[in-house]
């Protein structure tokens, strides 16, 4: 299949974005750089500041048909780059280590291709989503008052995936990426002199019990599928040898493959904290951070994607188990049928979020081809 796009401009864009990474919630210059190139494609509509720095280019067909949303992400990570690249990050302590710079290049390539071959029916929405890494962007885009203007019928996204042959399409029926969320439990007692702990209420024992019980909860309760709690941080009182502590906090990450399991795990974890707080006469407060639902693929759309991959002669890999990381594209698949798939970025490349990761430009074209194949399937 012939596809029209300017590869040199995409590589140039990818390297420009790589040089100037921006963190979640701050991606305004990134959006501007992407937009400058998009303007040349003359989309029918360009919606800016969607859910923050987000951007959507819309191409309308002449006849009625489905609205397809293709999504990429704008943000980089607070990781220092160690690579000696000509286009290395110009900003200390931040870099594109999840390959979102490459995802944007693929999306601009798709825009060029669609611009040269506009939809006959329906609508193509090319979404550049902010704040993926902290799990806030997808939700903010969905809650934006202008989102109903582009309401999609089907949603698609890819993520570059180290450990698989470059350009291969990595598929999973059902859950592709896990649900996860951060739990912050705060315990309030009462300080006293360290010589008179009986006059205070130390949360020390409750904190230790909570660390143990949260860690073992997945084994002590039956879940449909994989469930995991990792205690990531705990703190008791202040460093003061004369004081019995009056405050503690425990932070943990909850992870499951299914959304119902996450509901179960959440309510059991809350019970544990509340029970131990109560039995030690402590006040407690629980809050949640970075909540990602599980990304669950639609069966019919997955079958369509297999057909597209076969036509493009892209090697396919079917995963046995979901990925343990989370993706906030799940907020879209909760509402609309769609697929998140992996695009292999090479068998021997470093892993995502590693300081030496760099998106391989050779997979820009395979990414465009698969997205464009979906586009053709529905809108041409
Ligand atoms: Zn990431
Ligand atoms: Zn990512």
Image (spheres, rainbow, N blue to C red):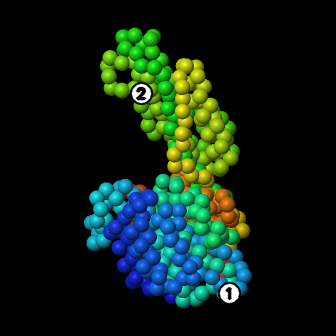
User: Quadrant of residue 123 in the image?
Assistant: bottom right
Depth check: give the residue in front, 289 or 337. Answer: 289
Numbered tag placed on residue 200 in the rendering = none
**Disc 2 Cβ-to-ligand 1 distance below 8 Å:** no
- Count of all numbered marks drawn on residues in the image: 2
Left or right: 77 with respect to 252?
left
Camera-side residue: 272 or 280?
Answer: 280
Image coordinates of residue 235 in percent, x first then y, are: 42, 31
Give the residue furthest to the front: 145
1 or 2: tag closer to the N-terminus:
1
Residue 320: % across, % down: 61, 57
Per the image, label 2 sits on a secondary structure element best described as strand
Q: Is residue 186 left or right of residue 123?
A: left
Q: Which mark is residue 236?
A: 2
User: Which residue: 68% across, 65% down?
Assistant: 337
Q: Residue at x 62, y 31 (%)?
A: 271
**Residue 49 vertical placement versus 266 (above, below):** below
Gap between marks 1 and 2, in whole Å?
64 Å
Relative to 113, 259 lies left or right:
right
Identify whether 375 is placed above or below 326: below
The x and y percentages for residue 148 are 64, 67
* Helix, strand or loop at mark 1: loop
- Near mark 1 (Cα within 10 A), the count class, few <14, some 14-19 or many ≥20, is few
Q: Nearer the viewer, residue 265 or 65?
A: 65
Q: In the rendered view, tell whether residue 139 sits above or below residue 156.
A: above
Of labels 1 and 2, the one closer to you: 1
Q: Kindly identify which residue carries mark 1.
A: 62
Residue 360: in sight, yes or no?
A: no
């Amino acid at each position: 299949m012939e596809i029209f796009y300017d590869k040199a401009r995409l590589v140039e864009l990818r390297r420009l974005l790589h040089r100037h990474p921006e963190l979640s919630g701050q991606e305004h210059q990134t959006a501007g750089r992407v937009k400058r190139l998009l303007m040349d494609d003359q989309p029918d509509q360009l919606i800016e500041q969607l859910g923050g720095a987000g951007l959507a280019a819309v191409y309308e067909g002449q006849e009625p048909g489905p609205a397809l949303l293709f999504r990429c992400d704008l943000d980089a990570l607070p990781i220092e780059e160690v690579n000696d690249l000509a286009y290395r990050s110009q900003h200390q302590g931040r870099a594109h280590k999840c390959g979102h710079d490459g995802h944007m290049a693929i999306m601009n390539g798709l825009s060029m291709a669609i611009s040269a071959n506009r939809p006959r029916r329906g609508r193509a929405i090319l979404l550049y989503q902010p704040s993926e890494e902290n799990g806030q962007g997808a939700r903010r885009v969905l809650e934006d008052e202008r989102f109903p203007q582009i309401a999609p019928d089907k949603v698609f996204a890819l993520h570059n995936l180290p450990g698989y042959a470059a350009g291969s399409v990595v598929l999973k029926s059902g859950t592709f990426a896990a649900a996860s969320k951060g739990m912050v439990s705060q315990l309030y007692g009462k300080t006293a002199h360290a010589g008179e702990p009986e006059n205070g209420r130390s949360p020390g024992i409750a904190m230790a019990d909570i660390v143990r019980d949260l860690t073992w909860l997945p084994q002590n309760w039956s879940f449909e599928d994989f469930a995991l709690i990792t205690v990531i941080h705990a703190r008791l009182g202040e460093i003061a040898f004369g004081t019995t502590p009056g405050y503690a906090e425990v932070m943990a990450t909850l992870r499951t493959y299914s959304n119902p399991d996450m509901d179960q795990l959440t309510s059991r974890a809350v019970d544990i904290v509340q029970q131990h707080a109560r039995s030690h006469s402590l006040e407690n407060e629980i809050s949640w951070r970075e909540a990602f639902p599980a990304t669950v693929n639609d069966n019919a759309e997955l079958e369509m994607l297999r057909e597209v991959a076969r036509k493009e002669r892209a090697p396919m890999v079917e995963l046995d188990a979901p990925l343990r990381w989370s993706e906030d594209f799940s907020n879209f698949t909760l509402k609309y049928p769609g697929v998140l798939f992996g695009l292999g970025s090479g068998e021997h490349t470093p892993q995502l979020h590693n300081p030496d990761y760099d998106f391989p430009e050779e997979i820009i074209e395979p990414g465009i081809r698969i997205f464009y194949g979906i586009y053709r399937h529905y809108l041409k």
